[in-house]
Image (cartoon, helix red, strand yellow):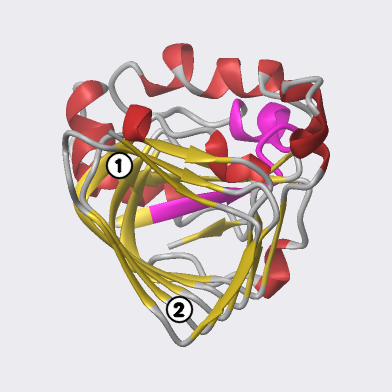
Amino acid sequence: MNVIIENKELENERLELTDKDSVYFLGPNLTLRNCTVLLKVSARNLIIIGAQFTDCTFEVKQELKNHQQWIKASLKGCRFKGRLSGCDFGHWPEYGKEPEYQLGSIEDCDFSEARLDGCRFHGCDTTTLRFPKWPCFTFLDPVGRSRQLSTVRWPGSIGRVVIEDLADYPPSTSALTWFAPDFAKRSRATPEELRAVIEQFDFIVY
């Protein structure tokens, strides 16, 4: 079943997007202010088409994996809670030619209560964002800093697999956040080994 929420403005509402048999469409022409959005569906069941969210809280009750559609949303003053992995936020117009890809933005948002792993932030001022603390860590300007990051010895397979790949990320990538325990496990390292390297750089938030 398709649940379509479009062409309206909602304020101080609570939206529960939790039916696993439904596909939720947010937008076009949807504005939410001071709303709470409860998410408990997979990425393929959440379609965002140019929606605007201001001062909203997103409570992610089921890990949201590989959801790129946030880049078709305008996010301002929003708070995220829960687990997100492989998600993209902000302004990444090269991702698609449809008009809604030009609408993506993120500012003044708070991820301090979220667990992010492999999440990227595009075309934004990272000083307006609150990133989660350790065991999450965030590279600021990972593309521009990729050469500097490659000058140190990283534990496990991190240097070869991850750091060298940063130079190939979209130029719009303003920040990249990982969850240290999973990141280290995939790289055959420990979080402690990882943190020892992270602490050497003032452009890594942890």
* Label 2 vs label 1, nearer the camera: 2
The residue shown at (20%, 52%) is 18
Quadrant (top left, top right, bottom left, bottom right) of the N terminus: top left
Give the class, few, some or many, for how many residues have Cα within 10 Å of label 1's Cα (few <14, many ≥20): many
Residue closest to the eye, 27 or 147: 27
Question: Residue 105: where, in percent of width, then height?
Answer: 73, 54
Residue denoted by label 1: 64
Residue closest to the eye, 78 or 20: 20
Asked if residue 136 is positioned above or below residue 65 in the image, the reply reads below
Is disc 2 placed on a helix, strand or loop?
loop
Q: What residue type is disc 1 on?
A: Leu
Query: Does 157 lie within the magenta span?
Result: no
Residue denoted by label 2: 35
Is disc 1 placed on a helix, strand or loop?
strand
Q: What residue type is disc 2 on?
A: Cys
Q: Which mark is residue 198?
A: none
Quadrant (top left, top right, bottom left, bottom right) of the C terminus: bottom left
The residue shown at (32%, 28%) is 155
Question: Residue 42: where, in percent of width, then height?
Answer: 26, 35
The residue shown at (18%, 38%) is 190
Instruction: Tell me whether circle 2 and circle 1 mark residues in contact (CB < 8 Å).
Output: no
Asked if residue 14 is positioned above or below residue 132 in the image, the reply reads below
In the displayed structure image, the side of residue 172 where residue 198 appears, left or right: left
The magenta segment is: 137-150
Residue closest to the eye, 163 or 68: 68
Note whether residue 205 is visible: yes
Number of on-image labels: 2
Asked if residue 81 is positioned above or below residue 12 in the image, the reply reads above
Question: Residue 37: where, in percent of width, then height?
Answer: 36, 67
Note whether residue 144 is visible: no
Query: Does 149 lie within the magenta span?
Result: yes
Give the class, few, some or many, for how many residues have Cα within 10 Å of label 2's Cα (few <14, many ≥20): many
